[in-house]
Amino acid sequence: MAPSPSPLGEFEVIVLMAVLHLQGGAFGSAIRAEIEARSGRRAARGAVYITLDRLEDKGLLASKLEAGTASRGGRPRRLFRVTAAGVKAVKQSVALVARMHKGLEPLLGDLA
């Protein structure tokens, strides 16, 4: 039996979801902007890039270099896409949170 993959952290799931939302235009600064727009929280540039590298090392993301443009001074940029394993990991993480949330509605309402 193969060992089960390590669970994803919250920020890893958020980064994967941002890449999914961006579909074909998922490069570093766009991913960061997507996270900030959807989550309402600041995402440090370094944290985003470290997480992208880690997710790629885990096989949950793949990237390719896009040719540089004049507006970028000829610098290429790295575009990311979620792999099949990444989609599976997001689904598992969302399902886990949903299972943990189930039945808490009355308790969470009392805390408000």
Image (cartoon, rainbow, N blue to C red):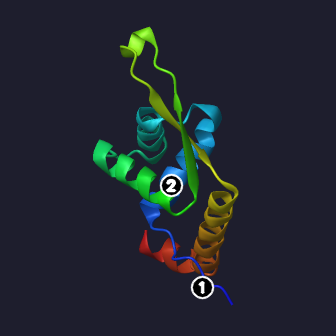
Residue at 39% x, 16% y: name it: 72
Q: Is the residue 57 above or below the residue 42 in the image? A: below
Q: Dot 2 corresponds to which residue?
A: 56
- What label sits on residue 14 in the rendered view? none
Mark 1 → mark 2, Cα distance in angstroms: 19 Å
Residue at 41% x, 33% y: name it: 29
67 on left or right of 48: right
The furthest residue to the bottom:
1
Q: Position of residue 6 (x, y in %)?
A: 51, 77
Q: In terms of depth relative to the viewer, which is nearer, 92 or 104?
A: 92
Q: In terms of depth relative to the viewer, which is nearer, 54 or 95?
A: 54
**Amino acid type for the residue under numbered disc 2:** Glu
- What label sits on residue 3 in the rendered view? 1
Q: In terms of depth relative to the viewer, which is nearer, 67 or 23?
A: 67
Q: Position of residue 95 (x, y in %)?
A: 66, 71
50 on left or right of 61: left
Residue at 43% x, 35% y: name it: 33
Residue at 58% x, 72% y: name it: 97
Q: Is the residue 62 above or below the residue 30 in the image? A: below
Label 2 environment density (alpha carbons within 10 Å; few <14, some 14–19, many ≥20): some
51 on left or right of 42: right
